[in-house]
Amino acid sequence: MQNGALLAELASTVARFNVLPLGSPCNLNCYFCSNRYNPPGIRIRRLPFLKLSELEPLFDFLDPCRKIVIGESATRLCEGEPLLHPQCLQVLQRLRSRFPQAQIQLTTNGLLLSGEMQRELATLVPLELVISFNSLVPHTRNRWLEDPRPERTLQQFHCLGENGVPFQASFLLAPPFLSEVPVSLKQAAAWGASLLRLLLPGGSALAPEELQGSLAYWREQSRRVQGWRKEVAAPMILEPPILDDLAADVDGVFPGSPAALAGFCPGDRITLIDGEIPFSRVDAFAALERAVNPLCRVERQNDVLWLQLEKERGAKSGVVVSRDISRRELEDTFRFTPSSGRGLILTSELAAPILTTALGAGFHDLPVSIAANQTFGGSIRVAGLLCVQDILKTCQELRYAGTAWDWLLLPAAPFDAGRDLCGQPIESLAAECGSPVYFSGSGSIRQ
Ligand code: SF4
């Protein structure tokens, strides 16, 4: 690491996301890797592996009360394969000795998960791996991930259960892998995966066509996932989730948990918790965690059930729900927006239905418009990849169509250190929109 500016950028990313970046090198070359399809102008930073001596000062910016994440790209830093880092184990050991109780999550493609490595990692719990399996078929792994020795990789996966390292398994729902997914999910669950993560393929306009699926295609995959949930014991989540409402639907249940023992099933809808109607999925999740022996009214197809969880205050309930929005997040957002004038919310295609439902549940009577992600294009639909130009273009189109507003509310997620992924400062938004701009959840005001 050579300069103070880079150190400041890394420190800010670590503090904001609780992600510890190790570096960008990777030992696979997956055809779907988003790093291959960034549009021109996107300022993604690729870093060589940082030395242990460079990483240790970044520990100061980690919050041990939140999950510490390794191996996930955050904002402009492109993250590679963490186990390829020559000092990866030492980094993890130092991290564990600095934060003995912290939950650590490490995402890996699994190529270097030898039996010995698995046993070393098992000594560092609470640590959980997220293994990007994607395919358990040797020739598919070789062709589409460029795994040079797929049989050996699969043998390593077979040992996961006996070596005792906790892990989640992820699979991309893209055409070369789709036909094997039902079987692979059962296999990953049999090896001991605690959670199965199914990823919708998100590709920019430069990605192969099969990674640029329409929203209709994504919905079709979402329906398939609901079917698989009935056949596999491990809980399953879809990322990103496609949500049209805030109904507290249960996506999955951890075996042996209070929710499982109470009889909860995937697909259940929680309508009351100790007499209170949950505002959203995440509020239901939090209410269950807070409560002592909560009694729940649950709708299951045409039946209504009353299920009681036996649990202590603060203990995990064991239900898995998709991330939507909490009442608190909305309250924090609207604490700083004007109570008068015409406000307009611009957000991503995926967030718009949830926000519209949430506002209808007693918050502001504000219109919500979608800012299409034209910079990335393709099937990129999440707020985190919106750019300043996308928002300005949407404003132009809305003005042309006769829409007027006095202030704008935008998602905070796309902006890191005041800039979008193209390096455009957020100040240019307010200047070019000609109206004050507010950011969700941040409380910050940009005039
Ligand atoms: S393992 Fe991850 S970082 Fe490496 S090529 Fe595949 S998708 Fe990209």
Image (spheres, rainbow, N blue to C red):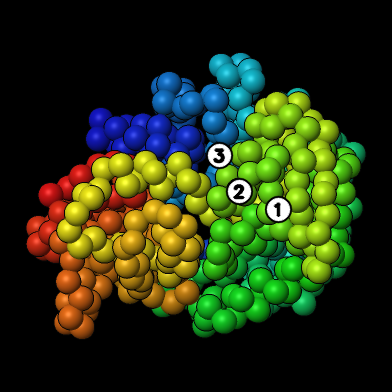
x and y percentages locating residue 434 in the rendered image? 9, 62
Residue at (32, 32) in percent of width and height: 7
Q: What residue is shown with label 1?
A: 270
Horizontally, residue 155 falls left or right of residue 332, namely right
Q: How many marks?
A: 3
Q: What residue is shown with label 2?
A: 278
x and y percentages locating residue 73 in the rendered image? 48, 49
Indicate if the residue with disc 1 has its beta carbon within 8 Å of ligand 1: no
**Disc number lying in front (3 or 2):** 2
Q: What is the CA distance from the residue labelled 1 to the residue labelled 3?
A: 33 Å
Q: Are marks 3 and 2 in contact (CB under 8 Å)?
A: no
Residue at (80, 68) in percent of width and height: 301
Is residue 214 in view?
yes
Is residue 252 in view?
no
Asked if 441 appears above or below 219 in the picture, the reply is above
Horizontally, residue 310 falls left or right of residue 394, namely right
Going from the N terminus, do you reach mark 1 or mark 2 first? Answer: 1
Q: Are marks 1 and 2 in contact (CB under 8 Å)?
A: yes
Task: Say what amino acid the circle numbered 3 marks.
Answer: Ile
Indicate if the residue with disc 2 has its beta carbon within 8 Å of ligand 1: no
Q: Residues within 10 Å of mark 2 (few under 14, many from 20)?
A: many
Give the structural element (helix, strand or loop) at label 2.
loop
Q: Which label was assigned to residue 70?
A: 3
Q: Residues within 10 Å of mark 1 (few under 14, many from 20)?
A: many
